[in-house]
Image: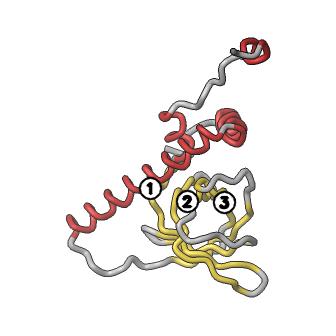
Amino acid sequence: MRNLIDELQPPIAHVNEDDLQLFVLGRLGIDQESAIEAHVMGCPDCKDKLTATTRFVAQLAQLSDKQRARDDREMRREPRFHTHDRGVLQALAPLSMDRSAVRILDISKNGLGLLLPISLDPGTVVQVRFGQIIALGEVRYCRPFEDQFQAGIRLQNVTDLKH
C-alpha cells in the first residue's frame, strides 16, 4: 500500500545521458552545470550514470588516441612546454563539488603536469579549466611535492571555448 506522501511527491526528473556527456566535456553553460551538479549530488542513480558516462567518454578518447598512434606510426613522446598558467580543477569520477586552484607546470599534446593543493588517486577523472580551455583527463600519478602535490594528467579531450 502506497503512502499518501509518496503519491503527492512529484517524480524525480533525472539528467539525460546527452546532458551528462556535455557536462563531462565542459560544453554546458554555468547554470546548466550547476543544476546538474546539484541534482547528481542528491541522486544516487544519476551519480552512477555520471560516473559511467565519464568513464565511457574517457574510453572513447583512449581508443581515438590509440587509433591515431597507429595511423601516425610515431613512437616517441611529445615535447613538453613549461608554463606557470593557473587553472581550476574539479574531480568528475568520483564526482566532487569542490574546485581547486592549480598551477599548470607543463603541457604537451596528451598531458598536463599540475601542482595542486590536494592529493588525487590515480584513475580519477578530472576537468581542468584554464583560460578558454576545458581539458578532460585522467590522473596518472600524484605525489607529494614540498607542501603540495604534483600530478600528471593524461588528456582525453580538450575543448577550446573560443571556437
Mark 3 residue crowding within 10 angstroms, few (<14) / some (14–19) / many (20+): many
135 or 81: nearer the viewer = 135
The disc at residue 122 is: none
* Colouring convention used in this rendered image of the protein: secondary structure
- Horizontal side of residue 160 vs 43, given as left or right: left
Residue at position x 73%, y 71% from top?
118
What is the three-letter code of the residue carrying label 2? Val
95 or 45: nearer the viewer = 45
94 or 140: nearer the viewer = 94
Query: Of marks 2 and 3, which one's residue comes earlier in the chain?
Result: 3
Eye-nearest disc, 2 or 3: 2
Locate the N terminus by quadrant. Answer: top right
The reply to whether discs 2 and 1 touch (Cβ–Cβ < 8 Å) is yes
Residue at position x 53%, y 30% from top?
16
126 or 55: nearer the viewer = 55
The answer for how far apart the CA atoms under marks 2 and 3 are is: 10 Å
Furthest-bottom residue in view? 146
- The answer to which image quadrant residue 149 occupies is bottom right
Where is residue 41 shown, x and y percent of the image? Answer: 70, 42
| Secondary structure category for the residue under label 2 | strand
Instruction: Name the residue beneath numbered marker 1.
Output: 58
Residue at position x 25%, y 61% from top?
67
Q: Is 148 above or below relative to 91?
A: below
The answer for how far apart the CA atoms under marks 2 and 1 are is: 8 Å
Instruction: Name the residue beneath numbered marker 2.
Output: 125
Where is residue 144 shown, x and y percent of the image? Answer: 69, 84
What is the three-letter code of the residue carrying label 1? Ala
Eye-nearest disc, 1 or 3: 1
Q: Is 83 above or below relative to 89?
A: below
Query: Of marks 1 and 3, which one's residue comes earlier in the chain?
Result: 1
Instruction: Name the residue beneath numbered marker 3.
Output: 89
| Secondary structure category for the residue under label 3 | strand
